[in-house]
């Protein structure tokens, strides 16, 4: 049986700190260059988008079971915690309207409509691939797999997404097992808010933001300052931050939250590595 590094292995890795800080910066800035693409950073829209790309990469036109139909989207999204069918249909419509997805009639049965990823979607997903692989490259600079991902290699990207679907249950368990990250990620632009918070307290012994954090984070994450405040109030209720000053103008990150985000990041690294190994095996088999 192949040995895959565990989250605990990554937490103990001598280069974990460099990888973690890289992940913080990459996650905070993903899709920041395009207002329309920022929606892909939201949990529900992002998961639906990644499912689209994964199913398309693993698609076999001669096998109807591999085609990405509306019912497949609904089932897969339910596994990831989004069980409202109407909400899922709205997500699909948004992906189509934004040029990431098209509907095509299946070759085996013209009555069946399958959802296909466009080249625009694949290009956008390669940006996400880079986000996932830059911290891995920081961990293992000489590893070819991670270099390919960090450089958005097209063939590697296809193989990575073609082997991602079997890891869906693991991804769902990863979020369920890390309540701190799960809370943030489920908020609008939550992953970016979480990582901009980590940027704001980086290197500070008191782990406390400047008083202008809400406005700064709102600008970085393309949301309102009241939204940032609301997210932080929810985090405070869970014991993950401490709001201080008039109207809670500063945010102090508790040790529990910092440890939780690091633990979640290490679990992400372990899952990325597993997916990368599967993709590398697929590429190696094709080359032989």
Image (tube, rainbow, N blue to C red):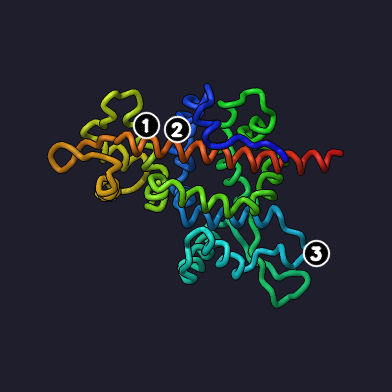
What is the spatial separation of the Cα atoms under label 2 and label 3, in whole angstroms? 42 Å
214 horizontally vs 100: left or right: left
Quadrant for residue 24, please give it.
top left
Q: Residue at x 55, y 67 (%)?
A: 74
Please state, as top left, top right, bottom left or bottom right, where the C terminus lies in the image. top right
**In the rendered image, the vertical position of residue 230 relative to residue 251, given as above or below:** below
Q: Nearer the viewer, residue 125 or 207?
A: 207
The label shown at residue 199 is 1
Residue 171 is at least partly visible in this image: yes
Q: Residue at x 64, y 68 (%)?
A: 69
First in sequence: mark 3 vs mark 1: 3
Q: Nearer the viewer, residue 104 or 234?
A: 234
Q: Nearer the viewer, residue 225 or 98?
A: 225
First in sequence: mark 2 vs mark 3: 2
What element does badge 2 sit on? Answer: helix
Mark 3 Cα-neighbour bin, 10 Å: few <14, some 14–19, many ≥20: few
**x and y, in percent, of residue 224 in the image:** 29, 48
**x and y, in percent, of residue 102 in the image:** 62, 62
Mark 2 Cα-neighbour bin, 10 Å: few <14, some 14–19, many ≥20: some
173 horizontally vs 241: left or right: right
Determine which residue is flagged by label 3: 62
Furthest-right residue in this view: 288
What element does badge 3 sit on? Answer: loop
First in sequence: mark 2 vs mark 1: 2
């Amino acid at each position: 049986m192949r040995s895959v590094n565990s989250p605990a292995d990554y937490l103990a890795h001598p280069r974990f700190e460099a990888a973690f800080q890289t992940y913080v910066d990459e996650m905070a800035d993903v899709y920041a260059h395009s207002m329309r693409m920022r929606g892909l950073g939201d949990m529900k829209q992002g998961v639906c988008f990644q499912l689209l790309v994964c199913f398309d990469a693993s698609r076999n036109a001669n096998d109807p079971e591999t085609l990405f139909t509306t019912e497949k989207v609904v089932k897969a999204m339910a596994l990831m915690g989004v069980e409202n069918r109407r909400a899922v249909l709205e997500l699909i419509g948004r992906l189509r309207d934004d040029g990431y997805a098209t509907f095509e009639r299946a070759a085996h049965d013209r009555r069946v409509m399958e959802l296909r990823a466009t080249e625009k979607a694949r290009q956008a997903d390669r940006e996400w691939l880079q986000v996932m692989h830059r911290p891995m490259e920081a961990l293992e600079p000489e590893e070819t797999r991670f270099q390919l991902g960090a450089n958005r290699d097209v063939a590697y990207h296809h193989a990575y997404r073609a082997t991602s679907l079997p890891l869906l249950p693991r991804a769902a368990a990863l979020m369920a097992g890390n309540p701190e990250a799960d809370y943030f990620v489920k908020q609008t632009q939550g992953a970016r808010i979480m990582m901009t918070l980590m940027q704001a307290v980086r290197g500070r012994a008191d782990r406390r933001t400047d008083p202008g954090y809400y406005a700064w984070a709102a600008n970085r994450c393309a949301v309102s300052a009241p939204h940032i405040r609301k997210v932080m109030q929810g985090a405070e209720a869970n014991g993950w931050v401490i709001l201080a000053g008039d109207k809670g103008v500063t945010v102090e990150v508790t040790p529990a939250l910092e440890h939780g985000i690091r633990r979640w990041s290490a679990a992400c690294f372990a899952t990325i590595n597993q997916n990368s190994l599967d993709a590398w095996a697929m590429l190696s088999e094709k080359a032989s």
